[in-house]
Image: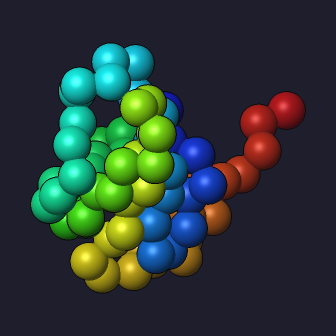
Amino acid sequence: MRISSLADSGCDLEIEAPAALDDGECTLWIGAIGPFPATAIRKTARQLLLRFKEPLDRKIVAHFNCAIA
């Protein structure tokens, strides 16, 4: 699973197996941080949009969005 477009309100998930996740309620761990309750919405066979129930702290978003040189 790959997380992209991480924001305080949600993120995109790309999954390897199309049947691995469905729409609905879920929780997400980002590394060792979490769980973050969310709602999953299917975008494509391999992509989900997650909307967090509570906004993520901006420090968490900044940490995981920093560029690695």
Query: In x, y percent, where is residue 23?
Result: 23, 52
Question: What's the residue at 41%, 32% (across, down)?
Answer: 45
Residue lying at the far left in this picture: please name it. 25
Question: What's the residue at 14%, 60% (across, down)?
Answer: 25
Q: Nearer the viewer, residue 16 or 36?
A: 16
In the picture provided, is 39 more to the left or to the right than 9?
left
Quarter assignment of residue 63: bottom right
Relative to residue 61, is residue 67 depicted above or below? above
Residue lying at the far front in this picture: please name it. 44
Q: Tell me, yes or no, if residue 16 can be seen here.
A: yes
* The C terminus lies in quadrant: top right
Question: What's the residue at 77%, 36% (across, down)?
Answer: 68
Q: Nearer the viewer, residue 32 or 30?
A: 30
Residue lying at the far bottom in this picture: please name it. 54
Query: In x, y percent, where is residue 65?
Result: 66, 53
Q: Tell me, yes or no, if residue 34 can be seen here.
A: no
Relative to residue 13, is residue 17 depicted above or below? above
Relative to residue 60, is residue 58 depicted above or below? below
